[in-house]
Image (spheres, grey):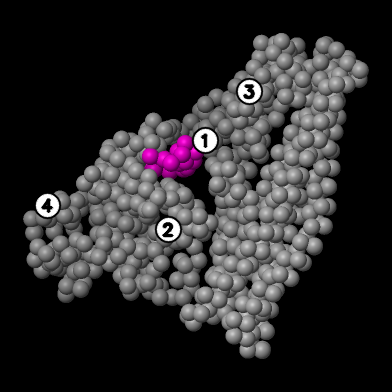
C-alpha cells in the first residue's frame, strides 16, 4: 500500500460516514411521509438511529483502521530499507569511480549506532501510528457530533414552516458538506480532514525513514557529507539550501570535525525537510563532485511563482471536492443541481491550473537559462515586505498572520495590487485589529478590521477579506490615477456649488467605473428574483461582495440579500441633497446629461449608484487581493465592473 493508497483508504471511510448519515435522513423522510410522524417522533427516531450509527461505525471502521495502521508501519520500514539499498549502490558506484571511503563497513564498529538508529525508527513508527489512531478516533467522534447537530438544526429549520424537509436537512448539513469531516486541528488553527492529515503524516514519515536508511549506510562507510539537490519543483522556502554541503549529524552520525561545513540539524531546525517538503539530499564526494551554483534570485522567484500556481490549483481542487460532496449528498434536487454546476466549474479550473503547474515545472531550467530572451522571469515584479506595510503588519494579531498576508500579496499575479499596498500604505494614520468588524474612516485615514468567523471561512470567505475591503476604500479615496474622467460628478458640483466634502472625485465614481457598474446593474435587473440565481449566491459566503452590490443597486429591503449594508448607507448622498434642498437642481443636471430623471425616485436611484460604486469597488479590490471563490463570483456577476477596476488600477501612480 503506497502513501497515495493510504489517503484513498481514509477518503473512502470519510465518504462512507457521510453517506451513511445522509441515507438515514433520506430513509426517515420516506418513513415520515408513509407513517405520518410528527417532528418530535422524527427527532426521537433520528436519535435512535444515531446510536446505531455510532455503534456500527466503531465496529466496522475499527477493524479497517487497524489494517491500515499495520500497513503504515510496513511502509515506513520498507522506505528505510529502500533508502539503505539505494545509498549502498550509490557509494559502491562512487568507489568504482575513484572515491576513497574513510572506512569500509564493519558491523562490529557501528553496531551501537545501528541499535540507536533502530530505536529512532521504532519511535518514528510509534509516533506516526499513535497520531493516526488519535485522528481516527476523532473522525468517528466528529461524525457522531455532526449527526446530532444536524438532527437538531433540521428540526429548527423545519419548524419555521418556510422550507421543505429536503432543504431543511441540506441547511443543517451544509457546514459539514462544505468542510468535510475536518477533525484534525493544527497548532495554527487550520482544520484538516483525516485523509489529508494522514497523507501529510505518512509522506513525512516515509521521507524521514528513507533518509534514515541512506544515513545508516553512509555511517557504515564513514561518510557524512551531503548536498541538497538542485531540482525542479522544490519549495521556495528551502531554495536557499540548494547546492550547499552539510555535515549530516542527524541520519549519518556526522559531527563538526568532519569538515568546515554547517550541520544538517541546523538547516532542519530552520525549516528544511518540513512536512511535504520536496527537497532531498545526496552524498557529497569532494574529489568527484562539482557543486552546482546556488540558485539565483530570479530562479528563486520562478520557484515562488510556480508554488503560487500549485497553491491555486490545490485551492481549486478543494473547492471542487467541496461542491462534489454537496452534489452527491444534498437531498434537495435544486441544491444538487446547483452544486454540480459549481463542482464542474471548479474541476475545470483545477485541471487548467494543474496543466499550468506542470508546464511551469517543466520549463523551470530553460526559463532560467534563457531568461534574457524568453521574458518569462526577467520581467520585474513588485515584492512587498513587512517594512513596506509596517502599519498593517504592526496591527496583525500574530506574526503568522503578517506572514500569511504578505504571502497572499506576493503570490498575487496582479502587480497593481501589490503596488497599491507597497506605495500607499504609509499614508494611513492608523490600522487597528477589531474582532467585531471593520470600517474605513476617510477623515482620519484609519482602518479597523477583523477576520470572518470559522463558519464563513469554511464557506469560502478569505481570512483577509475585511482588511482588503477596507484597504480598497482607502485606495479609492487617496489613490492617484491617470486618465480618469468625472464629467457627471463635476456637472453636479458646478451646478449646485457642492464641496468635495460631500462628493469627492475618486476612482469608484469616475465616469469609467460608473458606466461599467450600470451595465452590470442592467444585466442583473432580470435575475435578482430568479431562484437559481439566488440559490447560487446563497450557496456560499464568498458571494458576500456581489450580494452587497445587488443591495446597493436594487434596495436592501427589496432584494433581501444575506450580506448587505442598510438602505440608509446607500442613500446617504441623496439624503444630504434633500437636506440641502438641491435635489431638483441635481435632477436638472441628470436630464441635461441625458439620463431618465423624470421623477425624484429615479433621481434617488441614480444618486444611490455613487455609494453602491464605492462599496462595489472595495469588494472587487478585496476579491482581486484574496482570489478564490470570492473572485469567481465577482467575475461571474460583475464582469464589467471588474474589467473597469483592472483597467483603472493599471493607471495607479
Instruction: Identify the residue at image location x=73%, y=48%.
Output: 132
Mark 2 and mark 3 in contact (Cβ < 8 Å)?
A: no
Residue to which mark 2 is pinned: 634
Q: Where residue 59 sits: x, y (%)?
A: 80, 62
What SS does tag 4 mark? loop
- Residue under label 4: 499
Which callout, 4 or 3, points at the residue further toward the start of the chain? 3
Instruction: Tell me the CA gap for discs 2 and 4.
Output: 33 Å
Q: What residue is shown at x 23% (from left), y 44% (from top)?
A: 444
Residue for badge 1: 376
Say above or below: 127 vs 148: above
| Residue at the spot 41% in from the left edge and 40% down from the top edge | 396
Query: Which mark identifies residue 266?
Result: 3
In whole angstroms, how far apart are the C-alphas of marks 4 and 3?
63 Å
Rounded to the nearest angstrom, the CA distance separating label 1 from label 4 is 49 Å
Residue 204's x, y, as percent?
A: 71, 38
Q: Residues at badges 2 and 4 in contact (C-beta under 8 Å)?
A: no
Q: Nearer the viewer, residue 388 or 300?
A: 388
Give the alpha-carbon distance from disc 1 to disc 2, as whole Å.
Answer: 29 Å
Describe the element under mark 1 as helix, strand or loop: loop
Between label 4 and label 3, give the one nearer the viewer.
3
Q: Quadrant of residue 79?
A: top right
**Direction from residue 493 to residue 452 in the image, left or right:** right
Pair 3/2: label in front: 3
Give the vertical position of 242 relative to 631 (above or below): above
Q: Earlier in the sequence, mark 3 or mark 2?
A: 3
At 84% from the left edge and 17% from the top edge, which residue is drawn? 221
Q: Earlier in the sequence, mark 1 or mark 2?
A: 1
In magenta, the rendered stretch is: 395-419
Residue 406 is inside the magenta segment: yes
Amino acid at each position: 500500500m503506497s502513501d497515495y493508497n493510504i489517503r484513498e483508504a481514509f477518503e473512502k471511510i470519510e465518504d462512507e460516514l457521510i453517506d451513511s448519515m445522509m441515507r438515514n435522513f433520506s430513509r426517515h423522510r420516506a418513513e415520515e411521509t408513509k407513517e405520518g410522524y410528527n417532528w418530535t417522533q422524527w427527532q426521537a427516531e433520528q436519535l435512535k438511529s444515531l446510536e446505531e450509527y455510532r455503534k456500527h461505525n466503531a465496529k466496522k471502521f475499527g477493524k479497517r483502521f487497524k489494517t491500515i495502521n499495520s500497513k503504515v508501519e510496513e511502509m515506513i520500514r520498507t522506505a528505510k530499507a529502500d533508502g539503505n539499498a539505494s545509498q549502498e549502490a550509490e557509494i559502491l558506484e562512487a568507489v568504482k569511480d575513484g572515491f576513497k571511503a574513510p572506512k569500509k563497513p564493519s558491523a562490529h564498529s557501528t553496531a551501537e549506532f545501528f541499535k540507536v538508529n533502530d530505536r529512532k525508527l521504532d519511535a518514528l513508527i510509534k509516533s506516526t501510528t499513535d497520531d493516526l489512531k488519535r485522528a481516527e478516533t476523532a473522525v468517528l467522534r466528529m461524525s457522531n457530533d455532526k449527526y446530532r447537530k444536524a438532527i437538531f438544526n433540521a428540526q429548527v429549520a423545519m419548524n419555521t414552516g418556510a422550507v421543505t424537509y429536503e432543504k431543511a436537512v441540506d441547511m443543517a448539513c451544509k457546514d459539514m458538506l462544505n468542510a468535510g469531516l475536518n477533525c484534525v486541528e493544527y497548532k495554527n488553527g487550520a482544520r484538516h480532514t483525516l485523509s489529508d492529515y494522514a497523507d501529510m503524516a505518512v509522506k513525512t514519515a516515509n521521507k524521514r525513514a528513507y533518509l534514515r536508511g541512506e544515513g545508516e549506510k553512509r555511517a557504515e562507510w564513514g561518510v557524512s557529507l551531503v548536498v541538497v539537490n538542485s531540482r525542479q519543483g522544490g519549495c521556495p522556502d528551502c531554495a536557499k539550501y540548494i547546492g550547499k554541503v552539510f555535515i549530516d549529524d542527524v541520519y549519518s552520525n556526522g559531527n563538526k570535525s568532519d569538515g568546515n561545513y554547517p550541520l544538517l540539524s541546523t538547516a532542519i531546525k530552520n525549516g528544511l525537510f518540513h512536512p511535504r517538503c520536496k527537497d532531498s539530499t545526496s552524498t557529497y564526494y569532494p574529489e568527484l563532485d562539482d557543486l552546482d551554483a546556488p540558485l539565483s534570485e530570479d530562479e528563486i522567484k520562478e520557484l515562488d511563482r510556480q508554488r503560487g500556481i500549485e497553491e491555486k490549483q490545490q485551492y481549486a481542487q478543494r473547492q471542487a471536492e467541496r461542491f462534489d460532496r454537496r452534489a452527491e449528498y444534498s437531498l434537495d434536487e435544486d441544491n444538487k443541481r446547483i452544486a454540480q454546476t459549481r463542482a464542474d466549474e471548479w474541476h475545470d479550473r483545477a485541471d487548467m491550473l494543474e496543466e499550468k503547474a506542470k508546464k511551469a515545472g517543466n520549463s523551470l531550467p530553460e526559463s532560467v537559462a534563457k531568461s534574457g530572451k524568453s521574458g518569462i522571469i526577467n520581467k520585474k515584479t513588485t515584492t512587498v515586505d513587512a517594512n513596506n506595510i509596517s502599519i498593517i503588519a504592526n496591527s496583525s494579531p500574530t506574526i503568522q498572520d503578517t506572514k500569511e498576508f504578505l504571502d497572499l500579496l506576493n503570490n498575487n499575479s496582479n502587480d497593481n495590487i501589490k503596488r497599491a499596498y507597497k506605495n500607499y500604505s504609509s499614508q494611513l494614520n492608523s490600522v487597528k485589529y477589531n474582532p467585531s468588524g471593520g470600517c474605513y474612516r476617510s477623515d482620519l485615514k484609519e482602518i479597523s478590521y477583523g477576520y470572518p468567523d470559522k463558519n464563513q471561512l469554511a464557506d469560502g470567505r478569505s481570512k483577509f477579506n475585511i482588511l482588503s475591503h477596507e484597504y480598497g476604500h482607502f485606495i479609492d479615496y487617496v489613490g492617484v490615477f491617470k486618465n480618469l474622467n468625472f464629467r457627471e460628478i463635476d456637472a453636479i458640483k458646478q451646478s449646485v456649488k457642492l464641496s468635495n466634502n460631500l462628493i469627492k472625485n475618486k476612482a469608484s465614481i469616475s465616469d469609467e467605473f460608473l458606466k461599467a457598474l450600470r451595465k452590470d446593474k442592467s444585466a442583473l435587473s432580470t435575475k435578482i428574483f430568479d431562484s437559481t440565481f439566488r440559490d447560487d449566491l446563497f450557496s456560499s459566503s464568498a458571494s458576500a461582495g456581489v450580494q452587497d452590490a445587488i443591495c446597493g443597486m436594487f434596495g436592501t429591503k427589496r432584494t433581501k440579500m444575506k450580506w448587505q449594508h442598510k438602505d440608509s448607507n446607500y442613500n446617504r448622498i441623496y439624503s444630504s441633497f434633500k437636506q440641502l434642498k438641491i435635489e431638483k437642481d441635481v435632477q436638472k443636471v441628470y436630464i441635461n446629461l441625458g439620463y431618465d430623471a423624470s421623477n425624484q425616485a429615479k433621481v434617488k436611484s441614480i444618486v444611490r449608484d455613487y455609494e453602491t460604486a464605492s462599496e462595489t469597488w472595495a469588494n472587487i479590490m478585496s476579491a482581486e487581493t484574496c482570489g478564490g471563490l470570492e473572485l469567481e463570483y465577482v467575475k461571474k456577476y460583475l464582469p464589467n465592473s471588474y474589467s473597469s477596476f483592472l483597467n483603472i488600477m493599471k493607471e495607479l501612480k
